[in-house]
Image (cartoon, rainbow, N blue to C red):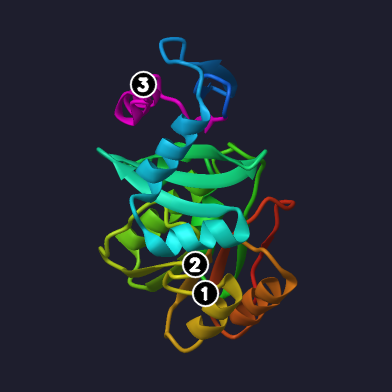
Amino acid sequence: MIDMNKLLDEAINQDASDIHLVCELKPMLRIRRRLEPIESMDVLTVDDMNEIYDFLIAGNVEKDEVYKRTKRLDASYEYKDIRLRVNVSLANEIPVFTLRLIKSTLPKYEDLGIPDVVRRITYQPQGLMLVTGKTNSGKTTTLNALIDHINENQNRKILTLENPVEFRHHSKKSMIVQKEVGEGRDVLNFSDGVKNSLREDCDILVIGEIRDKETMEAGIEMAESGHLVIRNTSYKILCRNNR
């Protein structure tokens, strides 16, 4: 029987960014981009994989139905002071898990080494900003540090669309509304969330992911209609300020 608390504690102690759980392998940690097995733990069995599923889904009927129908699931899980971004998929009809560890504290925007022009763009009344980079390059951390900086220094309404919500922000000088996207959650899909944001009187819209042309076009329309749109994307770096 796998001890998930022990596994998660080990990942936290080793400052891992990700946990990979695959049947017939030992649990693997990504530490500074290298994959390292947890030598003190046994090779994972089919029963272990099913136990891990029950541990992470925790009896959530809606998540279970989505996974059984689509054979994939993006969700979140909280352990101690850490949030986990959970991806469940299938291989040989056995669940496969990829867990991203997200610390509850964000670095200060000033400590990220980002050019000051990025901060100045956030004061514009409208425009489009893309936060880009490859996997594990710090896109999500940068995006949320930027949101936190706006929250502390500007009087704006910020609406985020995420799948799942990773960092939980609390309103400070700004008002923040965070919505989770997906079946059985706050918004069915990103496209619907972007379209409805036009009616929610937000100043800044943060789109956690662009999955289709419709969402991309809706985001551009939002920017052109007098809002600042910040999008997390893996495409080429582009900052465009619409005046």
Q: Position of residue 98 (x, y in %)?
A: 53, 38
Give the mark nearer the N terminus: 1 vs 2.
2
| Distance in Å between CA atoms under marks 1 and 2 | 6 Å
Q: Secondary structure at mark 1?
A: loop
Q: Which residue is mark 1?
A: 188
Q: Which residue is mark 3?
A: 10
Q: Do the residues under discs 1 and 2 have CB atoms within 8 angstroms?
A: yes
Pick out the residue farthest to the bottom: 199
Residue at (30% x, 29% y) in the render:
5
Give the mark nearer the N terminus: 3 vs 2.
3
- In the image, the segment drawn in magenta is 1-22
Q: Visible in this render: residue 186?
A: yes
Pick out the residue farthest to the front: 47
**Quadrant holding the N terminus:** top left
Q: Quadrant of residue 223?
A: bottom right
| Three-letter code, disc 2 | Val
Q: Position of residue 80 (x, y in %)?
A: 25, 38
Total numbered badges shown on the rendered structure? 3
Q: Secondary structure at mark 2?
A: loop
- How crowded pointer 3 is (Cα within 10 Å; few <14, some 14-19, many 20+) is rated as some
**Quadrant holding the C terminus:** bottom right
Give the mark nearer the N terminus: 1 vs 3.
3
Q: Is residue 11 above or below residue 49?
A: above
Q: Visible in this render: residue 208?
A: no
